[in-house]
Image: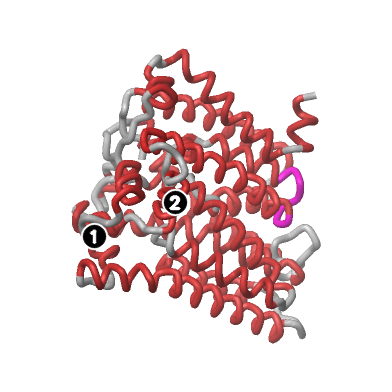
């Protein structure tokens, strides 16, 4: 019966499973309930967002944290007593998480069918970095906006519409005002477009499809630039630096370079093996799955079928899947080029929808049923175990990402 309910209401069931995992973690650490329910704690990046929501930007170092989420959180908190601020921020994030699960299911259902969408939603909801969706971090809001952007992108790549065009522009702007995504998106989109149009077979509809793709890219890029512009102007006025969010990385000792120690001697900020397990996955898996996707393109190029990502009618889907994995891989590249140990890489990759949307679609398109189901079940079980572990770390006020 539970299986039937989860199939009929996957997003709601995934949210319920997330809450159940939280409840199951409580006996393992009596500090979890206190730090979340009784006296909710504020640690690490959470404290920056809460401070910005209450007081605005007070120092140049805070500009690394983009404004749309703390602004929204501050507005909602204004309707409640001040001592409720942390509760309100956590509840707002959790509610955004609930809505984003439905959007993720809708997107994945269009990309890989009902079964693939079910796995996408559950893997995303129950991975350990989903703990941030229950805290006052921007990940839930960003997930909601980013998934809406991807859904609208699928629509406008297939048919022209002023409504879709406005939706793509607005959601792109909101993404850019919520998290540092502008450079990652521009690079990933250019590479994704090149990959799809180089590897797909040519036909008479190609010029029209290319025109739609170019229009989508122009709308998306313009929207993201427009989303950053007010923030950049604010930074120029207050800190005399239009690019303050980029320069702010120096306050965390991030510098451009080639940090081979991430490969030869990988470490997380906390030196925790549990955190490192997910940082390493975030570092390697997007690139490995991109390789699998390219293999699928090449293998099916000369004999496309309706079930393949390389069928002509599926080019818009393939573009979105490729884009998702490239954005996830871009975070891996940034980690390699900026810091000698892993810093929040697991959160950046696994607490946003791009990786899971791309990964599950590729797995369903390339792997036979039996090994695919075994792999997904094993990974889901491991994710649940680690999610409970992350809750115990939260109870101990330990680093999670």
- Which of pointers 1 and 2 lies earlier in the amino acid sequence? 2
* Count of numbered circles in the view: 2
Q: Position of residue 208 (x, y in %)?
A: 71, 84
Q: Is residue 115 magenta?
A: yes
Let me know if residue 383 appears in the view. yes
Discs 1, 2 touching: Cβ within 8 Å: no
Q: Position of residue 295 (x, y in %)?
A: 60, 60
Which residue: 53% across, 57% down?
A: 325
Quadrant that contains the C terminus: top left
Q: Is residue 73 above or below residue 370?
A: below
Q: Is residue 221 magenta?
A: no
Instruction: Magenta stretch: give its range.
Output: 110-116
Horizontally, residue 194 falls left or right of residue 283, namely right
Which residue: 50% across, 73% down?
A: 223
Quadrant that contains the N terminus: top right
How far apart are the two marked residues, 1 and 2, measured between alpha carbons?
Answer: 25 Å
Query: Any mark on residue 75, and which?
Result: 2
Most foreground residue, 97 or 154: 97
**Tag nearer the camera, 1 or 2:** 2
Most foreground residue, 297 or 130: 130
Horizontally, residue 57 falls left or right of residue 296, namely left
Q: Position of residue 95 (x, y in %)?
A: 56, 41
Which residue: 72% across, 52% down?
A: 112
Let me know if residue 298 appears in the view. no
The residue identified by callout 1 is: 248
Q: Residues within 10 Å of mark 1 (few under 14, many from 20)?
A: some
Which secondary structure type mostly characterizes the magenta part of the structure? helix
Q: Residues within 10 Å of mark 2 (few under 14, many from 20)?
A: few
Q: Position of residue 101 (x, y in %)?
A: 62, 45
């Amino acid at each position: 019966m539970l299986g039937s309910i989860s199939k009929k209401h996957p997003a709601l069931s995934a949210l319920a499973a997330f809450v159940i995992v939280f409840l199951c973690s409580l006996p393992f650490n009596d500090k979890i309930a206190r730090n979340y329910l009784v006296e909710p704690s504020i640690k690490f990046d959470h404290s920056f967002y809460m401070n910005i929501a209450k007081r605005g930007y007070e120092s140049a170092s805070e500009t690394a944290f983009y404004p749309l989420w703390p602004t929204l959180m501050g507005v909602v908190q204004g309707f409640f007593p001040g001592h409720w601020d942390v509760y309100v921020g956590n509840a707002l994030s959790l509610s955004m998480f609930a809505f984003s699960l439905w959007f993720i299911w809708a997107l994945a259902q269009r990309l890989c069918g009902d079964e693939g969408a079910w796995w996408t939603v559950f893997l995303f909801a129950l991975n350990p970095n989903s703990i941030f969706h229950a805290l006052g971090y921007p990940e839930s809001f960003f997930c909601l906006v980013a998934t809406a952007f991807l859904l609208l992108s699928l629509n406008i790549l297939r048919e022209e519409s002023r409504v879709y065009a406005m939706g793509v522009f607005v959601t792109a702007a909101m993404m850019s005002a919520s998290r540092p995504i502008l450079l990652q998106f521009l690079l990933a989109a250019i590479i994704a477009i090149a990959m799809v149009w180089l590897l797909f077979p040519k036909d008479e509809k190609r010029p029209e499809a290319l025109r739609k793709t170019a229009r989508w890219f122009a709308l998306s890029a313009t929207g993201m630039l427009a989303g950053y512009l007010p923030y950049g102007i604010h930074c120029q006025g207050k800190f005399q630096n239009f690019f303050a969010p980029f320069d702010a990385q120096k306050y965390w000792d991030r510098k451009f370079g080639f940090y081979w120690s991430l490969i030869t001697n990988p470490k997380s900020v906390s030196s925790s093996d549990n955190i490192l397990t997910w940082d390493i996955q975030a570092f390697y898996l997007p690139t490995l799955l991109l390789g699998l996707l390219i293999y699928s393109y090449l293998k099916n190029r000369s004999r496309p079928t309706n079930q393949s990502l390389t069928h002509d009618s599926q080019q818009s889907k393939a573009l979105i899947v490729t884009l998702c994995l490239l954005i996830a891989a871009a975070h891996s590249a940034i980690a390699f080029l900026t810091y000698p140990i892993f810093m929040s890489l697991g959160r950046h990759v696994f607490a946003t929808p791009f990786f899971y949307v791309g990964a599950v679609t590729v797995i369903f398109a390339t792997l036979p049923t039996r090994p695919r189901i075994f792999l997904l079940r094993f990974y889901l079980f491991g994710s649940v175990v680690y999610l409970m572990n992350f809750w115990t770390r939260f109870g101990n006020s330990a680093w999670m990402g």
